[in-house]
Each structure stands twice: as C-alpha cells, then as structure tokens.
Amino acid sequence: MPASVRSKQAVKGTITIEGHELTITNPEKQLWPEMGITKAMYLEKLTQLAPYLLTYCRDRYLTTIRFPHGWNDKSFYQKNAPEPTPDFVKTAELDSIQYVELDSLPTLLWLGNLACLEFHPSFHRIGQALPVEWLIDIDPSLDPEPLIMEAAEIIGEILHSMNIRSVPKTSGATGVQIYIPIAAERAYQFEELRRIGAFVAQYAVQKHPELFTVERLKKHRGTRIYIDYLQHGYGKTLSAPYTPRARLAASVSTPLTWDEVALRPDPREFNLLTIVDRLRQKGDLIAQLPPQSLDHVLSILPSSGK
C-alpha cells in the first residue's frame, strides 16, 4: 500500500498503565514537527515528567490547552473534563465546571493523547480557598525579551532583602515566574499575598522605571516588563512547574537556581528534549526550598484600604 494512503488511515493502539487500558490514537502525529516530537514521544516525555508535574497538579482544579493538530495550529482551553471520561479519571466541581483532577499517570497520558500540551492548575487545593504557594509573574512585552533574566534577578533580590527565599522558574513561554512555597500552617489569604506583591512591584517600578511597569493594558506598557501580582488569585491559574508549552522550542516551565539566572540563560534551552536529563541532575528545585513564612512582612505592611 502506498505510504500516502497509509498516512490517511486512522492509527491507534492500546497500552496498559497501572492496570488501566488507554487507547492511543495517531502515535506518529507530529505535535512539534520542528523538534521532531511525535505524540508517541510526547507521551514518553510526560511519563518521565509525571513524578514532578503531578506534584503541582494533584488536588487542584486543572485547566488544559489542547492542540489537536500540533502546537502551531488551532487550540482551545479545556476546563470541563473531556467526554467520554474514563472511570479512572477523577473530577471535582467548582462553579458548575467539572474539572479534571490530575492525580495519576494514566490520567496524564489520557490527557496527553488528547493533545493537551499545557497544564495550568489552580493556586488552591480542591475544596479549599487558601493558596498553596505564592507566585509573581514577570511578563515581558517583547518576544523574546533579552532582559527577562535580569528582571527576574532584580525581583529575587528584592524578595531576598525582605528575608523571603524563592525559586525562579521559566514560564515555558516568554516570562519568568517567581515561586514561593508557603508554610502550610500559615494559612495566608490571597489578599494578603497580593498586598506583598503590590509592594514588591511598586518598589521595583520605582527603582527601575525604564524596565518595569504595573500597567495592566499591554498597549500602554511599551517595551517594559509587566510585574503581574494580580494573576495570583482564587480560581486563577498559571503554568504548572514542568508543564510543556505550545511554543516552537517545545519549552517546559522549568525551575532554575539563582546562579543560573545570573548567567542569563535563554528560556528556550529548557525543553522536552533537555528536561529529563536536567531533572536527573538537579531534581525538583522547588521541593528543595523550605516553605516560607511571610508573617514578618505582613506585620509591617498596611492592611488593605488603609
């Protein structure tokens, strides 16, 4: 049979993961053709990423972005669990939406087979209203932004001067997010963290007005880098640590060390073809940072409205 005919036929098979049978469709479909990454390769990479990615998606309300024909084609956000939903997939309801709970390798591979290329979890756990971590999103206006690592380093230094330790992570797209794990017993409100974020952002803009802005409208930012402390809120999401992103380089949202940031790496260096070796060498940098108390900062900041 000619190859041109064979390529038009639907190809699928089944695999068994943790006792659950999954149907894999079109395993040779190119999801990142420029990088040579097929769906089969993508599922293999997800399997290797699973111990890390699941850590930050488990027990969260999950939004995915699906790209049925590859990273550079049409896409759509998926909040409601895709149907038919296998028996092994858990869901959780919030505001009349049945979200997938990404808590297992079979669920991850099921989503991967549906060409979910990005995973964006809520900041709070299922059934709870308090944040698990605090993030500041550093969002550039330029793509690529040559100063993004310098900008991240400045924010990190401001936090360090406030006795707050943090981990920078590439967003996987153009930006960097500063990640601060929170001590579980502290039970901070989103509004309290937003107050600290506002202070950090305004201080950075005051010190570096040519580099930073807190202007929400992109058309008014010029080339300045937006410090987004407002995205961290109830029901909102950001890219999970270790999620792939639908970008040309098949980049992955990757935690870095501050020493690495000082070397000004290109975020595109951290991608599906490099991330597994990196994790073998460095492990999960976020998990290596002790949860932070922010009591000392909140005690000196004015309350909202004062």
Image (cartoon, rainbow, N blue to C red):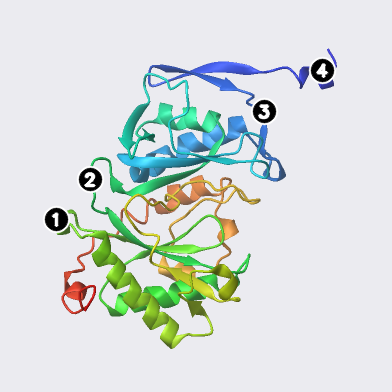
Disc on res. 263: none
Q: Quadrant of residue 302?
A: bottom left
Give the x, y percent position of residue 188: 20, 60
Q: CA distance from mark 2 to mark 4?
A: 52 Å
Q: What residue did someone put label 1 on?
A: 185
Q: Residue at x 47, y 28 (%)?
A: 82
Q: What is the three-letter code of the residue carrying label 4?
A: Val
SS for dot 1: helix
Residue ID for mark 2? 128
Q: Amino acid at mark 2?
A: Gln
Q: Earlier in the sequence, mark 1 or mark 3?
A: 3
Q: Which of marks 4 and 2 precedes in the sequence?
A: 4
Give the Cα separation between the discs numbered 1 and 4. Answer: 61 Å
Alpha carbon separation for disc pair 2 and 3: 40 Å
Task: Inspect the image, locate mark 1, and give the three-letter code of the amino acid beneath it.
Answer: Glu
- Tell me, for residue 5, which label it has, or none: 4
Answer whether residue 118 is visible to the viewer in this image. yes
Secondary structure beneath dot 2 equals loop
Secondary structure beneath disc 3?
Answer: loop
Which of the two labelled residues, at mark 3 and mark 4, occupies the earlier sequence position? 4
The answer to which of 287 and 94 lies nearer the viewer is 94
Q: Provide residue 74's location: percent of width, then percent of height.
A: 65, 41
Residue 218 position, x and y percent, is 56, 68
Which residue does the numbered mark 3 point to in the structure image?
Answer: 28
Relative placement, left or right, of 75 versus 171 is: right
Q: Residues within 10 Å of mark 4 (few under 14, many from 20)?
A: few
- Quick check: marks 3 and 4 in contact, CB under 8 Å? no
